[in-house]
Amino acid sequence: MQLEHLCPKTKGKLIFTHLQDKPSYFNKNGLDKDLLLTIALNGEGSQEIIINGMAHEFPSYSIIPLVSAQDYSFEKPERITAWQYSRDFYCNMDSYFEISCFGLLFFGYRGSQFLKLSESDREKFTALQQLFIEEFQTVDTIQTDMLQMLLKRLIILTTRLAKEQYLEGKIYEKEKFDLIRQFNILVDQHFKTEHQVSHYAGKLHKTPKNLTRIFNGFNYSSPSQIIQDRIIMEAKRLFTYTSHSVKEIAYELGFRDAGHFSRFFKKATGLKPSDFRKQQ
């Protein structure tokens, strides 16, 4: 089944997909302006998920959060339960930073974040799935509020799993971890024009050296690697979904010289831009 709800006030969108044979909101994000944040749950049996051109094993009974800029596809989408929503459906910037739209799930981590579900976790998520189905079928004036409340519960449950599994054995320092989140948000907003760590460090009132030390303390990718990954992610989307030339894409991503951009892309991906485009 695939259920959709549109918020009457903001026109924000929420889609709940459960074991749908051919889900229309999966696979490619493309360049659609209505990009969706996704929390995807895989059922029984592992499968392959392709994220930004790279294959990963999606273990059985596990969850992965996917940001709107990521291009992804599932080997067996009919086994997936997914919650997808636009930021204007649920983007509570005033709430505690961990569960906002710019919270830990989507901006506190980088890379492929697969979260394992224990037996008790599965029961919680199964119960939550049923509540979503019931609420989608209850059409009244407070339906949006109820769906937002259920979505907030989903985000809280998933965030707790992320903290337990990715911060295990580490000292959780709210201020330092929030600094990582703020850095990721700034990179997402300015990566096309600002490529240097020093720019973002200055915005956060830190030196590049101090910023790197904080990231290392969480076994996190370096600040420079995060900037590079975001540029490459966008470059791949542009090569896949537009016919823009290498020069045009280089310029859009803040490179004055197409040759410099091509070398940057090949060093990061192992492929020339032209070879990458041929594979799409």
Image (cartoon, rainbow, N blue to C red):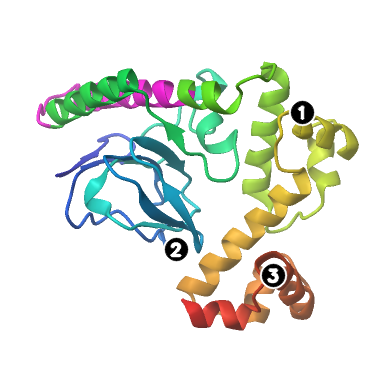
Q: Is residue 153 magenta?
A: yes
Q: What amino acid is labelled 3 in the image?
A: Phe
Q: What amino acid is labelled 1 in the image?
A: Gly
Question: 15 and 66: which one is in front?
Answer: 66
Question: How far across and how far down the image is residue 88, in percent?
Answer: 40, 38
Q: Secondary structure at mark 1?
A: helix
Distance CA(mark 3)–CA(mark 2): 20 Å
* Image quarter of residue 180: top right
At 63% across and 39% down in the image, what residue appears? 185
- The residue carrying mark 2 is 31
10 relative to 200 in the view: left or right: left
Q: Specify the principal SS of the magenta part.
A: helix
Which of disc 2 and disc 3 is earlier in sequence?
2
Q: Secondary structure at mark 3?
A: helix
Question: 70 and 242: which one is in front?
Answer: 70
Which labelled disc corresponds to residue 217? 1
Q: What span is colored magenta in the figure?
A: 137-159
- The residue carrying mark 3 is 265
